[in-house]
Image (cartoon, helix red, strand yellow):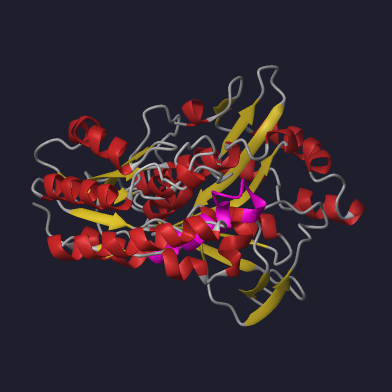
Amino acid sequence: MIKEDLPGGLVARRPRADDQPRVLAVLDDWWAGFGGDAGSLQRSRLLPRLFFEHFTASSYLVEHADGTVAAFLIGLLSPSQPDVAYIHFVGVDPALRRHGVAAALYRQFFADAARYGRRQVRCITSPGNTTSLAFHTALGFRVEPGDITVDISDAVDGRTSEPDIPHGRVTAHRDHDGPGLHRIVFTRPLNGEPPTTTSTTSRPASAPVGPHTGRDVRVCFLGDSFTAGVGDPTRLGWVGRLAAATDPDGTYLTTYNLGIRRETSTQIHARWKSECLPRLPAGTDNRLVLSFGVNDTTVDDDDTTVGGQRPRVPLEESVATARTLLTEAGGLLPVLMVGPPPGLDEARNSRIRALDVRYAAVCGTLDVPYVSVFDALAARPAWAASLAAGDGVHPGAVGYQLLADLVRGPWCSFLNTNGS
């Protein structure tokens, strides 16, 4: 899995004891000397040799083609909490950040931990590390309620701020690592992540592993660029966040993201059977999530109609197409529909709002659950800010998290309904 997810030229393996001084040697460079000598000492104390001797089966080291260290993740399977796996320390070469390296390491750790019978992953960060806060919440981690609330700002451990980091206040645990060392505590449920075929993990003798006996649920997410998660630097979008945050209940969940940029309802209807049905074999609990509409309301710059105001798909045609698609799909498997989100263009927003109302009515008639997100997102300044910080149309990580939060409740109910 790691090999497939990492950028070209990078290779992942298990660390060895002689890797410890190599990792320590790159820390000060990667952290740009943050904290001076005291900061350097603190980081070195977090990575004693024991982690490279006794926790290698749950840790990873990534190297460039020339053998230099590119990234690492030090994790462990808690010996005192048999349901918990813990991520202790992660580092990525600054030149590789926002290339999916850390996310690939985390996903590998999730899959390994799930195979070892662990149902939860935990880790911590300092309240000032807003980049870490944004990264972990994007991967489905939740902030565990603490006993203090702290301000977070644009400062990221004293370094330059990055887009899509959260702002405001966050709960933390007072003196978690000693006097004055407050920490944000993250928890993330494991959701039956399948074992990976390329893992080099050696199974610890103490890690019981049994056959998977839960539901085999397969879900196709069919839609446009919002479904695909365009604009999200974490590459998760709202679909990935839903899958990552789904509570563990014995479900073996497989999701297929079939979003294509610029596609309208007409184009999506034309491909739904050829795209979805081969991924939904007989004998499994198959489901479909639909989300489209924004592209239907778009007026192209080269529109030659009077006034240049004709959308790509007229309202009535868009509604009729949605009805046809829902009828066809609903006769074969359970369907959930997520409505189109708002943008920054008020003229187009009026068309999106009208389409949202009509989609909701169609779903109500066909007894298909519908999640309207338009009004809720339009009322959130963070949504508009996330759009403005990107390409003006698609949100960043913060916006997709807002969207995922709105869909999560109906999504969980949808998964718990009986399939056909």
Q: Where does the N terminus fall, quadrant-wise?
A: top left
Outermost residue on the right side: it is 37
Q: Is residue 370 visible?
A: yes
Vertical position of residue 12 compared to residue 268: above or below:
above
Outermost residue on the front side: it is 306
The answer to whether residue 178 is left or right of residue 158 is: left
| Front-lying residue, 190 or 21 | 190
Q: Is residue 151 magenta?
A: no
Q: Is residue 404 magenta?
A: yes
In the rendered image, which quarter is residue 81 located in?
bottom left
Vertical position of residue 350 compared to residue 220: above or below:
below
The residues colored magenta run 388-406
Relative image position of residue 412 (x, y in whole percent): 29, 63
- Residue drawn at x 16%, y 46% as measured from the top left: 324
- Residue drawn at x 85%, y 44% as measured from the top left: 32
The answer to whether residue 1 is left or right of residue 336 is: right
Relative image position of residue 237 (x, y in whole percent): 47, 48
In the rendered image, which quarter is residue 91 located in?
top right
| Front-lying residue, 3 or 414 | 414
| Front-lying residue, 137 or 47 | 137
Relative image position of residue 376 (x, y in whole percent): 45, 70
